[in-house]
Amino acid sequence: MVYKFIIRPFLFLFDPEKVHHFTFSFLKTVFKIPLIKRIVKQYYLVDNQSLKKELFGLEFKNPIGLAAGFDKNAKLIDELACFGFGFIEIGTVTPKPQKGNPKKRLFRLQKDKAIINRMGFNNDGVDVIVERLKKVNSDIIIGGNIGKNKITPNERAVDDYVICFQKLFDYVHYFVVNVSSPNTPNLRELQDKKPLSKILNSLQEINAEKEKRKPILLKIAPDLSKEQLQDIIDIVKETKIDGIIATNTTISRNNLISRAKDETGGLSGKPVKEKSTEVIRFLNNKSNHDFPIIGVGGIFFSSDAIEKQEAGADLIQVFTGFIYEGPKMIKNILKNIG
């Protein structure tokens, strides 16, 4: 209640990207105070054995994770772990650091409970991020969401994914191949069967040579046709990757009422909820639940999470809902789901 009626209205007065950086700096500073970490954990963590989930050979403390894009650069993993997440996904990480698209590039659509972003894979680059991951003290499961640099042509995209995979391998628990962001020019062309199979097979070949392989998942867009989704199912089977994250942001702008509705970029939040759920349901039904699915898109309340689970999601990720509902959101959802 304090967050929704006092903190959020104040924060929403300012530019969303500046607020994001301010919040990170604030949390980093506050968590240096003795006992703060323990107090936050006592208030937000839900310790329930029945919530544990084993998937990809990993044991998740609970099924609710923080989606990629929130902590792109692995700056706040230990602090965010205290708010009750079962796992945290960093990235999207690229081989070289890049500034991303010109500002302003992040927009709140408050009337639609949504966000539009056209960040453009802004991140500090894989080498800097690896150094941060080396210092993580939390035992939380970390996913590494990987992509290509904007200047890398699509015909050489596989090289960027391989670089990130190799460098992050010892410091994350699973990988996510991101070819579905709408904010890097021509990136979504890599969702086509031939280039996507090339990327995934290349990573799997490297994976097989490791002493212990890491799970590889594919993050897909909610805007794919049924024919394209069927191709995705075939690709998962052919490349033997471990699962799908459904879905990324949408380029659709149906039924929006907020002033910023015409901004370009990826739309997340409530408006993508049904699209995401339908993609999950399609993949689950057409594959006979042949592979795990992490569901993300428009999750604000426990009813939204349950809807994703019923459609076939094995785990859940949140992002926009976390910004709108605040940190107690995770605890509220975990109290009501199985």
Image (spheres, helix red, strand yellow):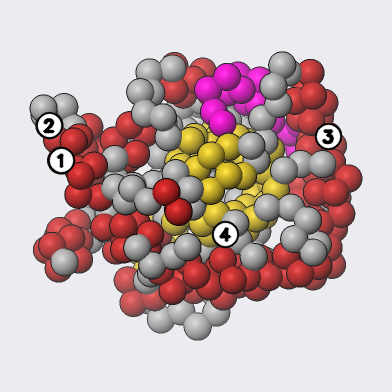
Tell me if 58 is positioned left or right of 132 in this view.
right
Q: Which residue is mark 4?
A: 295
Query: Quick check: 110 above or below 60?
Result: below
Q: Which residue is mark 2?
A: 35
Q: Closer to the N terminus: mark 1 or mark 3? A: 1
Q: Are marks 4 and 1 in contact (CB under 8 Å)?
A: no
Q: Position of residue 63 (x, y in %)?
A: 49, 52
Q: Which residue is mark 3?
A: 201
Q: Which residue is mark 1?
A: 39
Q: Which residues are magenta?
A: 151-173
User: Is 94 in front, or is 294?
Assistant: 294
Callout 4 amino acid: Gly
Q: Secondary structure at mark 1?
A: helix
Mark 4 or mark 2: which is in front?
Answer: 2
Callout 2 amino acid: Leu
Question: Dot 2, how many residues are within 10 Å of its Cα: few (below 14), some (14-19), or many (20+)?
Answer: few
User: Is 278 in front, or is 64?
Assistant: 64
Measured Cα–Cα span from mark 4 to mark 2: 34 Å
Mark 4 or mark 3: which is in front?
Answer: 4
Q: In which quadrant of the rendered view does residue 178 lie?
A: top right
